[in-house]
Image (tube, rainbow, N blue to C red):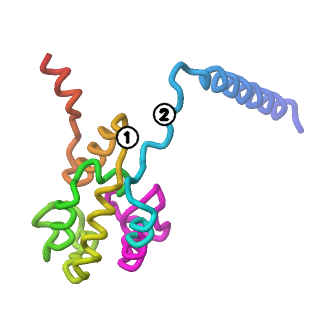
Amino acid sequence: MRAGEKNILIVIGALVIVMMGYRAMHMTADEPDPGIPFYTTATAEMKREAEIVYKDNDCSNCHALWMVRNMLESVPAPPLDGIGSLRDEQWFYSYFSAENPQAILPTRLKEEYRMPSFAHLSERDRRLLAAYMSSLKVESWYLDEVKRTEYEKLTGKKYQSESHEAGIQN
């Protein structure tokens, strides 16, 4: 190894050590980790039955649930974690029952990526999915992030949070 190469390695090693030290010092920040923001209010039985319907209809080809996404697909559909904090059970039932879901929730996605109709499912399955989706909650501290993500994916516009707008008005 030449002298110049040794010097480069020494500099890189020193930078790595400095960065690790910097990171270690800032890991003891005042703010504790708030934890995972997503949870469900569904019973274990409802969760199990709804996940069967979810899998049978290939929902994971487009949507992430519990931060799990089908790695073979890259459809820009919104994640479902916390979606029940944005919509209620009746809304979901109407959406799943619609012959044209885009009439209820318009989207900018290409036609092949748009939400399909689930009107063909049995009423029991649509009600089960609606109840389960409405049970997928998010902690209040994370709700603004969920709203932003859904708004920006659906509209392509920058989301202005309610707290941000309130700050501008004051």
Front residue of this view, candidates 123 and 57: 123
Q: Residue at x 53, y 19 (%)?
A: 30
Task: Give the magenta-colored segment's residue range.
Answer: 51-78
Q: Which of the labelled discs sits on residue 119, or is there none?
A: none
Screen quadrant of the N terminus: top right
Left or right of 141? Residue 152 is left
Q: Dividing the picture into quarters, in which one does residue 9 lie? A: top right
Q: Dividing the picture into quarters, in which one does residue 61 lie? A: bottom left
Distance between the alpha carbons at the discs numbered 1 and 2: 10 Å
**Depicted 109 relative to depicted 149: above or below:** below
Q: Residue at x 65, y 22 (%)?
A: 22
- Residue lying farthest left? 103
Front residue of this view, candidates 2 and 125: 125
**Depicted 163 relative to depicted 106: above or below:** above
10 Å neighbourhood of mark 1: few (<14), some, or many (≥20)? some
Q: Circle 2 sits on which residue?
A: 34
Q: Circle 1 sits on which residue?
A: 139
- The residue type indicated by label 1 comes to Glu
Within the magenta stretch, is there residue 63?
yes
